[in-house]
Amino acid sequence: MITFSLRHTFESAQPLTFYADFNQASNTLVYPQDSLLVSVTQSGSDEKGSLHVSGGRRGYVTSEVRRRFRLRDDMGKIYKKIRTDAYIAKAIDLYRGMRLTLNDPWETTLVFIISQFNNVKRIRLITRSIIAKYGSEIEGRAAASARSFPTSADMTKATEKELKRLGAGYRARYIIGAADYCTNNVDLDKLPSHKYLKLKEELMQIDGVGEKVADCIALMGYGNLKAFPIDVHIKRTMEKLYFEGKVKRIREIRDFAESRWGDYMGYAQQYLFHKARMMA
């Protein structure tokens, strides 16, 4: 048995939150990957139940589920490292089994460009509308939602007017710029995933990707646990918990996080962020 909660992971505002379908009654998550529709069901305990995976090409899909949900991560070791105070200990107890996910870099880039100054409901609506319009049909699937996530090349066909009609607003021009850059100027799959500073520098060349979005992509698109995305919620939470309410610069907060949680600071961020969001 491994410590993993499909429900907490889906609900934690990571890329799959914004376009996958989760059935809480059956504890089943369904999402498109490549030309397949993957289904993951967790039976038994919400934290330690067994997983059933389906979607064709069984060996490939099973391997990808292990990779995507980071099922090889030693959560006992991670919890021991990041459980440094009562607040984060409470977050672990509330959302035990929530894991960081490892997603396609372009998918991660697109959803976090959409996420800027947006809430989860709106991000999900826009993302799913984009998939419905620009994604390809998954063979043998009749459901309208069973479409592949559009590639950056697919998205170069989009117009600003179309994207605004889908709810993207001012983000439409950034989506178009990012699609063009990621199709014609950079191979996202070849960026240095383990070199945090170099990776972040490369990601910030993409239109619409600032420091916070670059950290989200580094963390959830490349699995770099040195990334510590700092948005308004995390900044306020960190200042309140660790700086006696004093206003701090982003650099100071990141340095503190690195000294406190080290190689697992990305996991600490996700637990802090999710608790702050759910308790708001």
Image (cartoon, grey):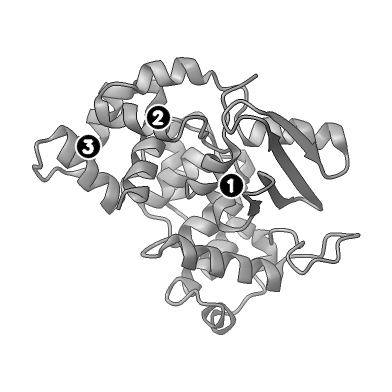
Q: What separation in Å lies between label 3 and label 2 (alpha carbons)?
A: 21 Å
Indicate which disc, 3 or 1, sits on the residue closer to the N terminus. 1
Q: Locate residue 269 relative to residue 38 in the image: left or right.
A: left
Q: At numbered mark 1, what does the secondary structure look like: helix, strand or loop?
A: helix
Q: At numbered mark 2, what does the secondary structure look like: helix, strand or loop?
A: helix
Amino acid at circle 3: Ile
Screen quadrant of the N terminus: top right
For residue 141, the mark is none
Q: What separation in Å lies between label 3 and label 1 (alpha carbons)?
A: 26 Å
Q: Which of the two marks, 3 or 2, is nearer to us in this view?
A: 2
Viewer can see residue 197: no
**Is residue 46 depicted above or below 129 in this figure?**
above
Question: What residue lies at 28% left-to-right and 50% top-to-bottom?
Answer: 233
For residue 105, the mark is 1
Indicate which disc, 2 or 1, sits on the residue closer to the N terminus. 2
Residue of label 2: 92
Residue of label 3: 253
Question: What residue lies at 51% left-to-right and 48% top-to-bottom?
Answer: 11
Question: What residue lies at 45% left-to-right and 30% top-to-bottom?
Answer: 225
Q: Position of residue 61 (x, y in %)?
A: 79, 37
Q: Position of residue 122 (x, y in %)?
A: 48, 68
Q: Which of the two marks, 2 or 1, is nearer to us in this view?
A: 2
User: Along the line of sight, which residue is nearer the eye, 279 or 196?
Assistant: 279
Amino acid at circle 2: Ile
Amino acid at circle 1: Pro
User: Along the line of sight, which residue is nearer the eye, 121 or 182?
Assistant: 121
Q: Residues within 10 Å of mark 3 (few under 14, many from 20)?
A: some
- Specify the quadrant of the image occupied by residue 82: top left
Indicate which disc, 3 or 2, sits on the residue closer to the N terminus. 2
